[in-house]
Image (tube, rainbow, N blue to C red):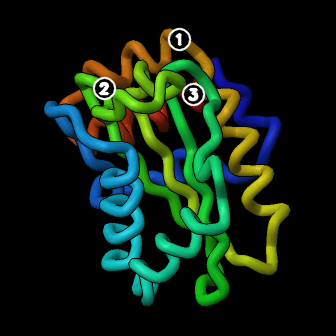
Amino acid sequence: MFNKRSQNIPLSSFFFPDNIKIFDSKESKDYLALELLENLGLTFGIGNVKQIYDSHFKLNSHPYILISEKVIVHHFRIKTIEKIRLSLAIIKNGIANKEDINSSGIQCILLIASPKNQPGIYLRLFNKLQMLFKEKDFITNLLTITDTQKVCDFIASTEME
C-alpha cells in the first residue's frame, strides 16, 4: 500500500493517540483546525496558538490544501518549534460547512506544524501523507476505527505492507 522505503522516517512516528481526535458529530473545519492546533500546543508546548491560528487565516485566502475528496491539510509554519508536529481529526459524519461546496465530503483533517526555517521537512512529510491519504481503501478503513491508539496502529501497519 505505502512504500516506506521512499523516505527514511516512518509516518507512524508522527502520530500519537493524544493528537488524534475522533468526532461522531459534524463540526466546522475552522473549529477543528483550531482544536487540533490547541491540542498540539498543549502537548508540545507551542505558545500563542490563537495568534498563530488567526495569522494563518488572515494571510491565506485558502488556508487548507485538499489532498483527496475526503482529506484536507492545514499547514502552520511556526518560528518557535524545532520539530515537525502532526495532528489528525477524523469526522465520521463529515464537516459542517455548507457554504463551502468543495469541502462537503471532508472526513479527515490533518494539521501540520513545522519549523518556519525548515520548509523541506514539511514538503517531505506532506508528500508521504498525500500518497497515503489519497488511497481510498486507507480512508475507508480509517473511518471505521473508533480508538485513537488503533488509528496509530493502523497507520503503522500500512507502512509494513
Q: Is residue 119 left or right of residue 101?
A: right
Which residue is the extreme one toward the left?
Answer: 25
Q: What element does badge 2 sit on?
A: loop
Q: Which residue is mark 3?
A: 133
- x%, y% of residue 69? 54, 19
Q: How many marks?
A: 3
Under mark 3, the amino acid is Phe
Q: Residue 59, how many percent across, how many down? A: 66, 67
Residue at (48% x, 22% y) in the render = 101
In the rendered view, tell whether residue 117 sits above or below residue 150: below
How would you rate the neighbour count of disc 1 (Cα within 10 Å): few for under 14, some for 14-19, many for 20 or more? Answer: few
Q: Could you tell me the amino acid type at mark 2?
A: Gly
Name the element at disc 1.
helix
Figure quadrant of residue 18? bottom left
Q: Which mark is residue 35?
A: none
Where does label 1 land, which residue?
Answer: 136
Alpha carbon distance from label 1 to label 2: 16 Å
- Residue 21 drawn at (x, y percent): 27, 48
Which corner quadrant holds the N terminus?
top right
User: Closest to the observer: 62 or 107?
Assistant: 62
x and y percentages locating residue 35 in the rendered image: 31, 61
Question: The C terminus lies in which quarter of the figure?
Answer: top right
Q: 22 left or right of 116?
A: left
Q: CA distance from mark 3 to mark 1?
A: 8 Å
Q: Amino acid at mark 1?
A: Lys
Decide: is 7 above or below 131.
below
**Residue 6 versus residue 84 in the image, above or below:** above
